[in-house]
Amino acid sequence: MRPGVPLQAQKPIIDHLAEKFKDRVIVIELDVDENRETALQLGITSIPTLILYKENREVERFVGLQTIETLSTAIENVLQPFP
């Protein structure tokens, strides 16, 4: 796979999920080239990296291309109340 292809393939999935969950989640995209310090602080070493937060805590991290099913299930799980 050419560099950038996983990121290009992930974008429409993220856009779809942002729309699907628009009233329940906030989706933020970070350009790591423009925000190297933030990427470093977040421990992002590969792209795409997707991080799910709940109540300001990281609860799950995905590195590399993910399916819509995987991410949708992960988001649904994060939206459940903490036990």
Image (cartoon, grey):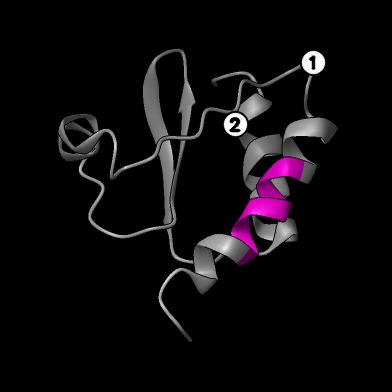
Which residue is more in the foreground, 9 or 34?
A: 34
Q: Secondary structure at mark 2?
A: helix
50 left or right, relative to 10 = left
Rendered residue at 42%/34% (across/down): 59
Amino acid type for the residue under numbered disc 2: Val
The picture places residue 82, in percent across and down from the top left corner, at: 54, 20
The picture places residue 43, in percent across and down from the top left corner, at: 20, 43
Q: Report the span colored magenta.
A: 9-15
Which residue is more in the foreground, 78 or 29?
A: 29
Amino acid type for the residue under numbered disc 1: Asp
7 left or right, relative to 80 = left
The picture places residue 53, in percent across and down from the top left corner, at: 46, 27
Q: Secondary structure at mark 1?
A: loop
The picture places residue 62, in percent across and down from the top left corner, at: 44, 54
Whether residue 1 is situated above or below residue 28 in the rendered picture: below
Where residue 78 is drawn, which disc sits there? 2
Q: Is 60 part of what is drawn in magenta?
A: no
- Check disc 1 and report the residue beneath it: 23
16 left or right, relative to 81 = right
Quarter-of-image position of residue 45: bottom left
**Separation (CA) of disc 1 from disc 2:** 14 Å
Quarter-of-image position of residue 3: bottom left
N-terminal-most mark, 1 or 2: 1
Near mark 2 (Cα within 10 A), the count class, few <14, some 14-19 or many ≥20, is: some
